[in-house]
Amino acid sequence: MSALFALSPLDGRYSNKLEELCGHFSEYGLIYNRVRVEVAWLKALAAESALTEIAPFSPATLTELDTVVAQFNDEDSAAVKEIEATTNHDVKAIEYWLKKRLSHNAEVMKVSEFIHFACTSEDINNTSHALMLKAGRDEVLLPVLDRVIERLRELAHLHAELPMLSRTHGQPASPTTLGKEMANIAARLIRAREGIARVSLTAKFNGAVGNYNAHLAAWPDFDWESFNRQFIESFELEFNPWTIQIEPHDTMAELFDAMARANTIAIDACRDIWMYISLGYFKQKLQAGEIGSSTMPHKVNPIDFENAEGNFGLANAVLRHFSEKLPVSRMQRDLTDSTVLRNMGVGFGHSVLGASSMLRGLGKLEADPARLAADLDACWEVLAEPVQTVMRRFGVANPYEQLKELTRGKGITRDALLAFIAMLDIPPSERERLSAMTPAGYVGKAVELARRV
């Protein structure tokens, strides 16, 4: 189908930007991971000497089983879907496809009924979903987030010493540096990124309602819990021994909440940078052939930050639904999670699109030192803060009130401020120090903090 007819822009307009995610979160990705888990389970059973009814596989058969996974392709997934059309059960279709795919192998056929042995569909599904999330996070989401953080770090270091007028409540406030503001964003995203990476994704492999009922019916004296723990941990997942039929999705919710938190920080950053562009603190590098407005030829719009904000918002709407819905299941199992889980790629897709757009926007930014300096030079009233603070130190009566009367709600010139300082009853060296201050020089530890990120 042409991308022009795709229902979702993720599969249409933006499909070429999300190819990496498709291998993980598409129907193909889910089928592939189910095959991966089923094959690994069969190999694990055959390798366990205590399960004497399952003969160990020869090196040739082990190689063939590995090849089934390594060379799994779109034709294989289509064959699985064809079987599913008859079974009307997606996981059972995997079992039947594997039996057909390996029908020529006498060793496998001898133990073919141990494919999907003692498993409920959710044993395969929850492990597959955890593997999909792990790969999507580690191989796609975190790398693009790292590039955003690195670009913010570059801007923080590049502009560490470039003074900038702050705005609190939209009004002129104590100066900072442009680099320090970029460092603030980077530091927040670094912390959020650590939260995403820190989530330990759990999986279960304990049968129909989580008690190893079928396992123990077949081999009552075998330590299935330890065996299945080792199996899950072989995928670098955390084993969850306490479940109903489904793994309760709590760590999924933790991951989605962590992603949404990072996206929210990014939304805040995009809005602030949008404002800095509007104020002229940043200019945007021109792109050859790009049009800003269909009627106003002069415009260079901050479209990348607007696109990022929209995608982060869409991602969070989906991610927050995931984290609220997925941990809830009636009794031991209901299917309300099934459709929701098939949309994990939507949350990831909009998150990755948002980060990619933000990165593209950050790459176009060029500071305008002259514009920044002009804003600072027009706001000498911001030095009311250091003046009244020094007055407090030396016991001058009503320092705040005096500066409030002098500056609140009105601009003040350098000369007027110097005249006020000259009349202060404070040590001459302090009057001299205050008189030498400028808005551009009143930045505290901003330079140091910007360079430390």
Image (spheres, rainbow, N blue to C red):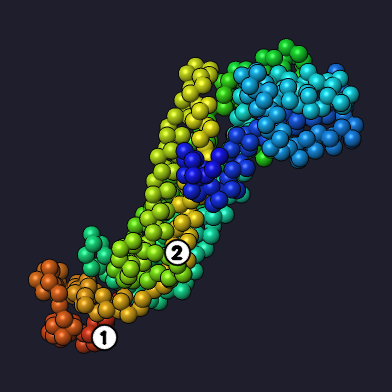
Nearer mark to the viewer, of 2 and 1: 2
Q: Nearer the viewer, residue 433 or 94?
A: 94
Q: Position of residue 116 (x, y in %)?
A: 72, 22
331 relative to 296 in the view: left or right: right
Can the viewer see residue 60 in this picture? Answer: yes
State the image quarter where residue 209 is shown: top right
| Residue picked out by circle 1 | 436
Question: What residue is at 76 percent from the left and 26 percent from the top?
Answer: 98
Helix or strand or loop: what does disc 2 sit on? helix
124, above or below 360, in the image = above
* Place of residue 450 in the rendered image (x, y in percent of width and height, measured from the top left): 43, 69
Q: Left or right: where does residue 317 sit relative to residue 76?
A: left
User: Which residue is the site of mark 2?
Assistant: 362
**What x and y, as percent, mark residue 67?**
80, 38
Q: Residue furthest top?
A: 217
The quarter of the rendered structure image containing the N terminus is top right
Taking depth in this image into account, of 5 and 249 the one nearest to the observer is: 5
Q: Is residue 371 left or right of residue 286?
A: left
Write down the quadrant of residue 144 in the picture: bottom right
**Residue that appears at 65% across and 18% down:** 86
Q: Residue at x 23, y 62 (%)?
A: 170
Residue 424 image point, x, y percent: 14, 82
In the depicted structure, whether residue 178 falls above or below residue 250: below
Determine whether label 2 and label 1 are within 8 Å by CB: no
Amino acid type, residue under disc 1 in the picture: Ala
Task: Choose between 422 and 339: the one closer to the eye.
Answer: 339
